[in-house]
Amino acid sequence: MMMSVVGLLAVSVITSRGTSEPTVETKVGYIVRDLKAMQATGPLQDDPGRDWPQQAQMSLTRLKRNIENAASIASDLERQFTAKSSGCAFAKQAADKIDKEIPWAATATRNALMALLTGTKARLTSLNDENNALGWIGWRGSREEAISELALFGHDVAATTANADLAFARLTNATGGLDKASATCR
């Protein structure tokens, strides 16, 4: 028993020596890199030869990851500027660099979500118009399943858009906190 405790302590001492907290510049660089990656998010291109619902779902999943990342960055920023030891250094380094990237990342995300919503609505309208032209009312098999799936997907895109708005607003507020914190630092 004593040997295992000593062994665990030795392993923890050896592994903890090699790990250190990244520098402020490194942290800011990671955040800016992540925001730039969000800026590169383009809207889903409508390719008639591909399976649009599958492509749209993959695009939405990628956008949801970006939104989760934005919320995570906001949490990290909030923690950073409340830390007494590194808060001022972080606030001075980060505020301007991060603040100027947020609108671009938010716009790219919003545009991609709007393109998904527009594509979904266009497909819904087309399927409903075909049903009406054929005089179909009620459940008609796979066409109605496709309509139902598109309606649910449209709802998911709309909810994701609201989440994106909240995440980027929180991120903007967090950088505003950094600006205020850096103004009080000497």
Image (cartoon, rainbow, N blue to C red):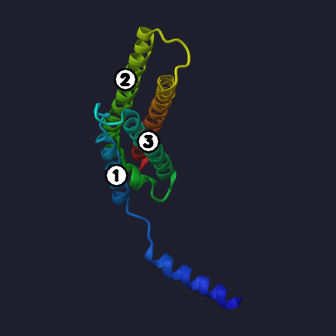
**What secondary structure is found at the residue carrying circle 1?**
helix
Camera sees residue 89: yes
Task: Give the vertical position of 78 relative to 131 (above or below).
Answer: below
Q: Is residue 34 left or right of residue 67?
A: left
Give me the residue at 45% from left, 34% from top.
164
At label 3, which amino acid type do we have? Thr
- Marks 2 and 1: CB-CB under 8 Å? no
Question: Picture quarter containing residue 40?
Answer: top left
- Where does residue 169 sit, x and y in percent of width and height? 45, 34
Q: Determine the CA span between mark 2 and mark 1.
A: 39 Å
Return the residue at label 3.
61
The furthest residue to the bottom? 3
Residue on which the image places disc 2? 118
Q: How many marks?
A: 3
Give the mark nearer the N terminus: 2 vs 3: 3
Residue drawn where x is 55% and y is 79% of the image: 12
Q: Residue at x 29, y 31 (%)?
A: 48
Badge 3: how crowded within 10 Å, few (<14), some, or many (20+)? Answer: few
Locate residue 66, reporting x and y percent: 41, 43
Residue where numbered disc 1 is placed? 93
- At x 55%, y 19%, the residue is 139
Of the two numbered discs 1 and 3 in the rendering, the one whose residue sits closer to the viewer: 3
* Amino acid found under the numbered disc labelled 1: Gln
Residue 77 is situated, as x and y percent measured from the top left of the image, at 45, 48
Judging depth in this view, the residue of 138 and 64 nearest the camera is: 138
Q: Are marks 1 and 3 in contact (CB under 8 Å)?
A: no
For marks 2 and 3, give the CA distance. Answer: 17 Å
